[in-house]
């Protein structure tokens, strides 16, 4: 009897581990590089969104959304760097630079909305000089809703409210970045 219980526990644990909704990136390695740094606001990066992929979305997923948020910005409410939603349920990757709405790399039918930089699309890291490391949370959401009918000008905080209200699961990668007092 002990063998069967042990076998059942091992199989159950393997199934649960195999079904974890997971976010990965070929481009993110713990700290952002100049590729993911904003070009503007005093920063001189390349402003290229990283490649992101996910797996094991829960049953019932009808679409995905991806956000990038910096909770360490001294605004009192953090800083939204990217919001892309209406990603079809059969898509499990955003290619590098998909955050540029002018280049048609993002999945067909997806929608990028306004960030705290004031426009739609990816806006890279640009913390204040000497403010220390900021944490950048790259999050993919599996959603129970297929499509949101928002304007691309809708503020990120409002869009995020609707994303979270319709979320089945989420997975997050964290990367860090800081600007020294002497950096550009």
Image (spheres, helix red, strand yellow):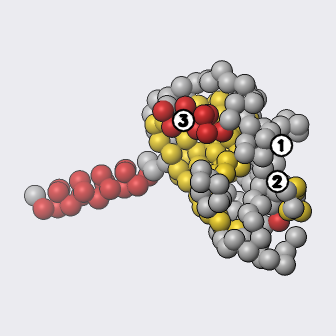
> Is 86 positioned to the left or the right of 20 in the image?
right
Q: Which residue is mark 1?
A: 100
- Measuring from the top left, give residue 97's x and y in whole percent: 81, 48
**Secondary element type, mark 3:** helix
Residue contact at pointers 2 and 1, CB within 8 angstroms: yes
Residue at 80%, 39% (x, y): give it. Answer: 119
Q: For the residues carrying marks 3 and 2, which lies nearer the camera in this image?
A: 3
Question: Spatial distance from mark 2 to mark 1, Cα to Cα?
Answer: 8 Å
- Measuring from the top left, give residue 133's x and y in whole percent: 66, 71
Residue at 54%, 25% (x, y): give it. Answer: 145
View extreme (top): residue? 149
Q: Is residue 7 visible?
A: yes
Q: Which residue is mark 3?
A: 161
Residue at 61%, 34% (x, y): give it. Answer: 159
Quadrant position of the C terminus in the picture: bottom right
Residue 48 image label: 2
């Amino acid at each position: 009897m002990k063998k069967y219980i042990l076998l059942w526990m091992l199989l159950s644990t393997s199934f649960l581990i195999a079904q974890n909704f997971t976010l990965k990136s070929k481009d993110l390695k713990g700290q952002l590089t100049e590729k993911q740094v904003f070009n503007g606001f005093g920063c001189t990066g390349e402003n290229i969104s990283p490649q992101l992929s996910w797996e094991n979305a829960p049953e019932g997923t009808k679409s995905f959304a991806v956000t990038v948020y910096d909770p360490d910005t001294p605004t009192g409410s953090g800083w939204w760097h990217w919001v892309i939603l209406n990603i079809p349920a059969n898509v499990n990757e955003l290619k590098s630079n998909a955050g540029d709405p002018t280049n048609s790399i993002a999945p067909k039918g997806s929608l990028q909305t306004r960030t705290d930089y004031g426009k739609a699309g990816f806006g890279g890291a640009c913390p204040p000089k000497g403010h220390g490391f900021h944490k950048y949370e790259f999050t993919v959401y599996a959603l129970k809703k297929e499509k949101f009918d928002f304007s691309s000008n809708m503020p990120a905080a409002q869009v995020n409210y609707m994303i979270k209200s319709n979320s089945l699961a989420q997975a997050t990668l964290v990367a860090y970045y800081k600007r020294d007092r002497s950096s550009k």
